[in-house]
Amino acid sequence: MLQELGEKFESVVRKLKGQGKLSEKNIADTMREIRRVLLEADVNYKVAKQFIKAVEQRALGQEVAKSISPGQLVVKIIHDELVRLMGQSQAPMNLDRSSPAVILLCGLQGSGKTTLAGKLSLYFRNKGRHPLLVAADVYRPAARDQIAIVGKSINVAVYSEDGDEAVQIAEHAVEYARKNMFDLVIVDTAGRLHIDEMMMDEIERMKQALNPDEILFVADAMTGQDAVTVAQSFLDRLDFDGVVLSKMDGDARGGAALSIRAITDKPIKFISVGEKLDQLEPFHPDRMASRILGMGDVVSLVERAQQSMDEAKAQKLERKLRRQEFTLEDFFDQLQQIKKMGPMKELIAMIPGAQTKALKNLDIDDKALVRVEAVINSMTVEERRSPHIINGSRRKRIARGSGASVQDVNRLLNQFSMMQKMMKQMNKGGSRMRMPLGY
């Protein structure tokens, strides 16, 4: 989502490179460009003005060390101010006050609350919690069915009742959770098409009845400055504890991410980075600032790897590599684990330096992995374990079975052979080869 914003920042900073000193003129020119970039990204104009003022004050008159360029210095200042703008550090969830802990979700209709309820359930279950989802949207047709489907897909219990008293349903759900050893209740409330007085009154009463540990406002990142306006309205009525930005994988311009924290003074706690229920990340201002400025996000990349990769399989793979026993079966297993981490273009964007023109313009086809899987799936067990036995007739059969061409099969086998030779040379060289998890 923030790729376009990052490219524009990079374009602005590039103009400073090669200059020996930051002067009032080149700083003023740069700030004017950055102001334009922020406003085009749908950042609130007051936030943009404050941001420009802070960067300008820090940059003006600073001497540039010989080891760095003016551009690098300005990038550092912009990075620091972006971090400050978005909240300095990750804001934790406060769920230890009561048992069961209660999370109340609020926001406009269509902002992604029901999907988020499922994502939070899965996230906290993986952290050792025992969550209960609550269907408290009594207005939208099929709302109960939708959350029931979400709960079933991740094997999380869902509480629902017939009736139109949402506050009462939520109260009953908390009591049910207490009696049945659920230690976390996530309440999916009705979305508002606009700031509706009757429905705002209902969620205020729900807050009073449940005394939730966390109230999260779900903001659709695609709505730009409107998300900030709506957030302020909910804040005035509910004084929520934090914000979740949904649909961060879309083509929004990024304004909400940069504005909402500054306007509401409430932390962004999570970002939703995809449609799948496991695509939810805690929000780290420093990591987001690094992504925006093209510095990558190695920490998040490693965390994704740790979540997606099976450590026992990784250790077994390392032993096989040392013994030169790596087969196409092992290669197939690695593909499955890499796919769990997300789209390849998204993963590459987390690597420092990936914002170079060559990498940004690289056409990364995730379907290529699917074709490779199809080719390997069309092989017999013996062929996967001993690829050298695959002769011409076998290659034709594999190509027909996978819907690929013989050239595709040849390409895969050649690449695999090159990989085996490389591993053999590394072992002969006596290097202590330590494979990262999943590679």
Image: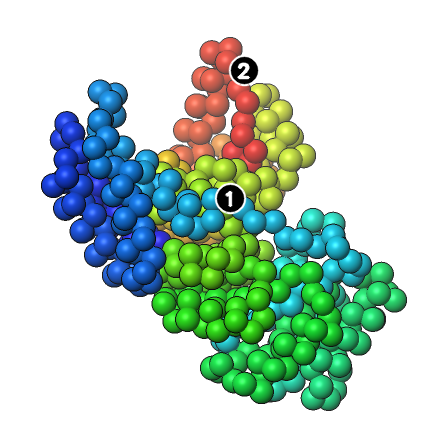
From the viewer's perspective, is residue 320 above or below residue 363?
above
Locate residue 304: give its quadrant.
top right
Mark 1 residue crowding within 10 angstroms, few (<14) / some (14–19) / many (20+): some
Q: Is residue 213 visible?
A: yes
Residues at marks 2 and 1 touching, judged by CB atoms closer than 8 Å: no
In this image, 207 relative to 395: left or right?
A: right
Q: Please name whichever residue, 54 or 302, is drawn nearer the observer in this view of the structure.
A: 54
Q: Which residue is mark 1?
A: 89
From the viewer's perspective, is residue 415 above or below residue 158?
above
Locate residue 84: give its quadrant.
top left
Secondary structure under tag 1 reads loop
Q: Please name whichever residue, 388 or 421, is drawn nearer the observer in this view of the structure.
A: 421
Q: Which residue is mark 2?
A: 432
In this image, 38 relative to 308: left or right?
A: left
From the viewer's perspective, is residue 185 above or below residue 342?
below
Residue located at (23% from left, 50% from top):
34
Question: Marks 2 and 1: which is nearer the front?
Answer: 1
Which quarter of the rendering shows the N terminus?
Answer: bottom left
Mark 2 residue crowding within 10 angstroms, few (<14) / some (14–19) / many (20+): few
